[in-house]
């Protein structure tokens, strides 16, 4: 992925707009159970134009990956790093504004079409979050 080694277990990953430091600790003896204290995956972003190039780059490196998966709001490629952590490379299109305009993002639950039939079930288990826009409106 173009990361530069900083020492035996630390890597620096930099893009044009963002970057990160990745530290490889020795993996535990047993695989973690999903829940608090475990990492499900680490996501990296790319453009729509560069996304297929990442798929090819991963393939040429001999890394087993998923195919490019259409997530409705973006496309993803998944693969595991040597310690077993799931990595995702997601593109930036078409974006969440495909369903609602930018000014309405966060004002209601939006779901991709394949989950729409389960809307009632999904909304029933969500924890309501405060609307940060409400305090701005009240201050005016």
Image (cartoon, rainbow, N blue to C red):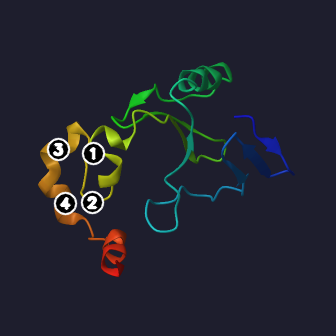
Query: How many residues crowd around disc 4 within 10 Å: few (fewer than 14), some, or many (20 or more)?
Result: few
Label 3 residue SS: helix
Q: Which residue is mark 1?
A: 100
Tags 4 and 1 touching, CB below 8 Å = no
Q: Earlier in the sequence, mark 1 or mark 3?
A: 1
Q: Earlier in the sequence, mark 2 or mark 1?
A: 1
Closest to the camera, between mark 1 and mark 3, is 1
Label 2 residue SS: loop
Query: How many residues crowd around disc 1 within 10 Å: few (fewer than 14), some, or many (20 or more)?
Result: few
Q: Earlier in the sequence, mark 4 or mark 3?
A: 3
Q: Earlier in the sequence, mark 4 or mark 1?
A: 1
Label 4 residue SS: helix
Tags 1 and 3 touching, CB below 8 Å = no
Q: Which residue is mark 4?
A: 123
Q: Residue furthest bottom?
A: 139
Q: Which residue is mark 2?
A: 107
Q: Which residue is mark 3?
A: 116
| Image quadrant where residue 132 sits | bottom left
């Amino acid at each position: 992925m173009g990361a530069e080694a900083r020492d035996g277990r630390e890597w620096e990953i930099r893009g044009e707009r963002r970057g990160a430091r990745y530290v490889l600790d020795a993996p535990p003896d047993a695989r973690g159970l999903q829940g608090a204290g475990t990492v499900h995956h680490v996501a990296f972003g790319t453009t729509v134009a560069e996304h297929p190039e990442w798929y090819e780059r991963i393939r040429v490196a001999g890394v087993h990956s998923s195919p490019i998966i259409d997530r409705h709001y973006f496309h993803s490629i998944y693969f595991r790093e040597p310690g077993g952590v799931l990595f995702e490379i997601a593109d930036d299109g078409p974006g969440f504004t495909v369903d609602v305009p930018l000014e309405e993002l966060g004002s209601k639950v939006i779901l991709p079409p394949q989950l729409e039939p389960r809307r009632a079930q999904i909304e029933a288990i969500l924890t309501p979050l405060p609307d940060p826009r409400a305090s701005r409106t009240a201050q005016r």
